[in-house]
Image (tube, rainbow, N blue to C red):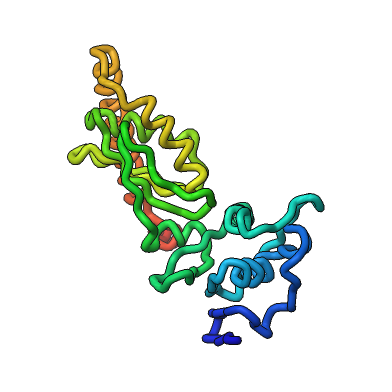
Amino acid sequence: MLCSTMKTIILCVVGSILLPSVSMAGTFADQCPEITVCAKVIGEMLGQKYVFDRDVKGQVGATPNLELTNENAEALFTNALNMNGFARVPVGTPNTFQIMRQRDARDSALPTIDADANTPPALPNNWDLYTMRYKASNPELVEHMARFSRSFMPANSRIIPVEWSGLLLITDTAANLKRIYDLIKSNDVKPTPEMKKQMQENRKRAEQQKMLDAQKKNVEDSQPTPTQQPKKKQ
């Protein structure tokens, strides 16, 4: 048994006394009523260790007929984390993860998966966060592909086009990346003259909007605040 506490961080290994004892037999609903309990159960089943902040909380619901097995444990647990706005991130030690908010996790050292039009990403069957590095066959389209794909991505995901290298950097769950890959691949086609014209118009509109936003900000910044208003003469 091992459980060490450092201010707000809890590292729980199999047999922690900080979490209630659970039986390894039963349904997912019985074994995983909330995230912290589920982390202990999954850790015991798969030989994994989890470190998490005291603020990591969240309930998990499931139908009574959903059994928890070694085969589906990782997929179910990472999906439960995703539904509650969390993700697990490798900490550099084998089979050890930190559970953190997705908005923070996406800026951490996530695993990177390469892909292109002929090579789909080698992603596991879970809901962990990954960064997919997609090498476009048509580099001039990366901005277009990014703009199109954003409409199908959740708020905590991220897609960055790198035009000079023809790359798309997409951070999302493994489950979502599989779907996004198909969308990106379907748009990675040689552009027609009409497409090139449309892209030029889109860039022009984007530049104009950027200039308008900058002008608006300059006007707002030049306005005196209430404390800067000149005093009226008596």
Q: Is residue 43 above or below residue 1?
A: above
Q: Residue furthest right?
A: 64
Circle count? 0
Residue 135's place in the image compared with 195, above or below, is below
Q: Give the quadrant of the N terminus.
A: bottom right
Say left or right for 113 vs 65: left
Nearest to the observer: residue 134 or residue 122: 122
Question: Would residue 209 be found to the left or right of residue 4 on screen?
Answer: left
Q: Residue at x 57, y 67 (%)?
A: 46
**Toward which corner of the image does residue 117 lie, by quadrant?**
top left
In the image, 35 versus 7, the foreground residue is 35
Q: Quadrant of the C terminus?
A: bottom left
Tell me residue 170's x, y (percent).
38, 45
Query: Is residue 43 in view?
Result: yes
Tell me which residue sits at (74%, 78%) in the image.
21
Question: Looking at the image, which residue is at 35% across and 49% down?
Answer: 113
| x and y, in percent, of residue 162 in the image | 25, 41
- The percent position of residue 92, horizontal first and vertical second, equals 38, 71
The answer to whether one can see residue 219 in this image is no
Name the one closer to the observer, 164 or 202. 164
Q: Going 58% across and 79% down the picture, which residue do you hit?
A: 13
At which x and y percent is residue 88? 51, 62
